[in-house]
Amino acid sequence: MTIKSTIVPLENGHLRIHEIWSERLLYVYEGGFSVPMENTNRCIAGQCATARSIIGTSRIKNIIGYKKAGIIRPEPNTSLYFPVTLLPYLTGVAESGKQVFISVISGVLPDQVFEELTVEIIGRNIEIGQLGQRINVKLEEKYNDGQ
C-alpha cells in the first residue's frame, strides 16, 4: 500500500488530497480540528460536519471519496488544550487499486466567517479557487514503486 498526501494551505484551513494505491480494501478516516465539548453546537449536513464552540468553529467537508460525516467525542485528555473535546470527521472505503480522497478542513475564531472555495476536478487536474486566487494540483498518473 502507498499513500501520497498533498496539503494545500487555504484561508481558514487547508485542502487534503490523499492518493491511495492498495491491493486490498481499506476503511479510511479523516479528522478535523478538535474543539472543547462544553457548550458546543453540532451540525452534520450531508457530507459536512461542523462543531461550533466558545473558542471557534471546526468544519470538515468531503469533496470527493468520503461517504459519511460525523462528530465524535475522543477519549478524555487526548487534546493538549482541553480535557474533553469534539472532533468532526469523515469516513469512506478505498477499494483495491487507486482511489483519491479530497477534503477541506477549516477552523475559524468566533468573529470570523469561512471563506468558501471552489474545487474543480478535470481528469488528473484539481483546480482550487478561493478569494480570487487559483491553485492547480496534478494527480499522479499511476504509482511507480520502482519494480
Image (spheres, rainbow, N blue to C red):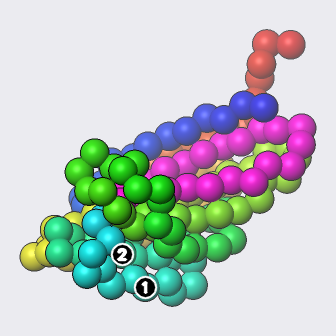
Q: Residues within 10 Å of mark 2 (few under 14, many from 20)?
A: many
Q: Position of residue 88 (x, y in %)?
A: 46, 67
Q: Say whether marks 1 and 2 touch (CB < 8 Å).
A: yes
Residue that carries the numbered disc 2 in the rendered image: 51
User: Which amino acid type is shown beneath numbered disc 1?
Assistant: Cys
- In the rendered image, which quarter is residue 84 located in? bottom left
User: Which amino acid type is shown beneath numbered disc 2?
Assistant: Ala
Instruction: State which region is magenta.
Output: 14-34
- In the rendered image, which quarter is residue 43 located in? bottom left
Outermost residue toward the left?
A: 111
Residue 132 makes an appearance in the image: no
Q: Is residue 60 left or right of residue 124?
A: left
Q: Is residue 84 above or below residue 57?
A: above
Q: Position of residue 70 (x, y in %)?
A: 55, 74
Q: Is residue 113 left or right of residue 28?
A: left
Q: Measuring 49% from the left and 50% from the top, which residue is drawn there?
A: 16
- Taking depth in this image into account, of 129 and 14 the one nearest to the observer is 14
Let me know if residue 23 is in the magenta part.
yes
Q: Is residue 10 left or right of residue 25?
A: left
